[in-house]
Amino acid sequence: MQEIFGKNGVETPEPLRATVSGHLPHWLQGTLLRNGPGMFTLGGTTYNHWFDGMALIHSFTFRDGEVYYQSKFLQSDTYKKNMTANRIVVSEFGTMIYPDPCKNIFSRVFSHLSSAIPDFTDNNLINIIRYGEDYYTSSEVNYINQIDPESLETLGRVNYRNHIALNLATAHPHYDKEGNTFNMGTSIMSLRGPNYVIFKVPAHAPGEASKSSALKNIQQLCSIPCRSKSNPSYFHSFGLTENYFVFVEQPFKLDILKLATAYFRGITWGKCLKFDKEDITLIHLIDRRTGKAVPTKFYTDAMVMFHHVNAYEEDGHMVFDIIAYKDSKLYDMFYMHNMKKENNHFIETNKMSSPPVCQRFILPLSTDKGEAGTNLVKLEGSAATAVQQEDGSMYCTPDTLCEGIELPGINYKFNGKKYRYCYGSRVKWSPCPNKIGKLDVVTRECLEWTEEDCFPSEPIFVALPDAKEEDDGEWWRVLPQVYYTSEQPAPMLNTVATSARAASKTDSACPLLFLESKFNVQCVSGVILTSVISHNPKKAPFLLILNAKDLKEMARATISSSVHMDLHGLFVPKKT
Ligand SMILES: [Fe+2]
């Protein structure tokens, strides 16, 4: 796996036209932005952990039937300091550097406890997020870096703390249909003790304010005290529905004192996270109208989670799906010494780690309580429970939807709404996902795409602009110029469309091209985008376009340049 994960990535600074084969939908216009670690060694120094690598940004631009690839290293302060010194000089979460520019910060710990939280690295390698019209690379700290989504140039870093009091913030915000962004963070050194903060960045600001950065108009929506004053929970994402935020306060905790003294103890910040398997997991529902958490205490067994899939309200219940683990070994799996092992050895080492499991929780929203021992989940079709306890709290147990799936995504138009399909990477005892999955959360069936020697990235769903259905929109659309010709009157076209639908269910090697040429119709399904790399030197990397309906390949854009394994990203539609 070393050749997949450990080798340094190479920039493609100018747009490189890919070789497209298959059927590229004409409506697919815009840019897929991706982010991930891309440089792991410098001047004889090496990071300890894969999540420490210096951020490499990628873009795949769809324009008039062509695909262009580009990649650039994020010009963060961290990157510049490292490159100037020609060695790694800035500490990351899994790598503590001595001496380090952070030393001065740590030195202040003893005289000013309020400065105990280190000035974290701005190596934002996890995701790309949008605030207003601006795009930023993001990790989980107080710094984000603005980028130009077209050129991938770094425009400068921003400190959240100039706008709102927090030390950590997720790389997985939510967006509403008005374009507002919602995100969540942790204020560690608040006078009242650490608290979790949910904030909104409006899409637009009135008058003069609209000309400045959207972040200047940030609004704090609520503050939730941490259960422990010395050990706030780590969280990576949260849920959003029409009326609630969903926050899972897991017993995967950050030891603040350890964090503040990590440098002197000779441990990394990553080692300041600890999973307490004897503790419970609290589930907070925060009313969006009041900013207050609902008073009922919902809890479940100890678990670790990173990604919410979706959440929605149905018949007086909150339904939310997450990817959960029984332990915290996932982070350890990505230490470089671990990943350098041969595949078989790696599997043996990590077999005891719990797999990622898609779990559904259902919480009753009604204030009507039952007797102790009563399961208050009344929705049918799920084994999830919420059992009333003597003290009025609810003990919740999830319903397992699927095992071995991570990096979940949905048709984001269904975020916060009842939905049916989750797209994700299928994983089993390996950090290398080698399959894309489409999980039907109703039937629990999972379609898959896979190809020998291939490692696909997190799948991103792109909806047809006027789609009606969740996973595709219409199947086929008869081309307008055909519709109006006298040779093919309208009734005939209905027959053609029906034939096209039927034929598409056959195992024809390339049904899309065949149908288009034969019937003069056009596929208009939603698509899944994933960038695919291979350890086979004869196999060039490619951007894969799958039909979201059946996960069949529609097209691939082969790239004659290096593409690196990444983490997360988002699709930016072309402005119309
Ligand atoms: Fe993530």
Image (cartoon, rainbow, N blue to C red):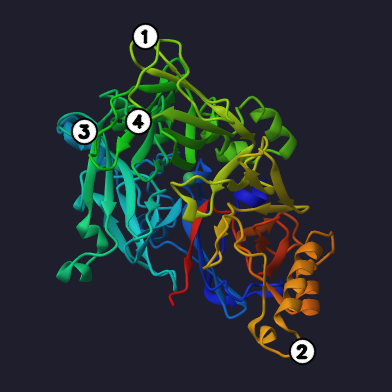
**Residue type at tag 4:** His
Whether residue 332 sits left or right of residue 141 in the image: it is right
Pair 2/4: label in front: 2
| Point 56% across, 64% down: residue | 10
Residue under label 1, please give it: 390
Residue under label 4, please give it: 284
**Residue type at tag 3:** Val
Give the spatial CA distance, label 3 vs label 4: 32 Å
Residue under label 3, please give it: 109
Looking at the image, tell me whether mark 3 or mark 4 is earlier in sequence order. 3
Give the spatial CA distance, label 2 vs label 3: 82 Å
Front one among 24 and 464:
464
Q: Can residue 546 be seen by looking at this rendering?
A: yes
Looking at the image, tell me whether mark 1 or mark 2 is earlier in sequence order. 1
**Residue type at tag 2:** Glu
Q: Kindly check if marks 3 and 4 are in contact, taking CB atoms under 8 A apart as contact.
A: no
Up the image or down, 497 lies above or below 372; here it is below
Q: How many marks?
A: 4
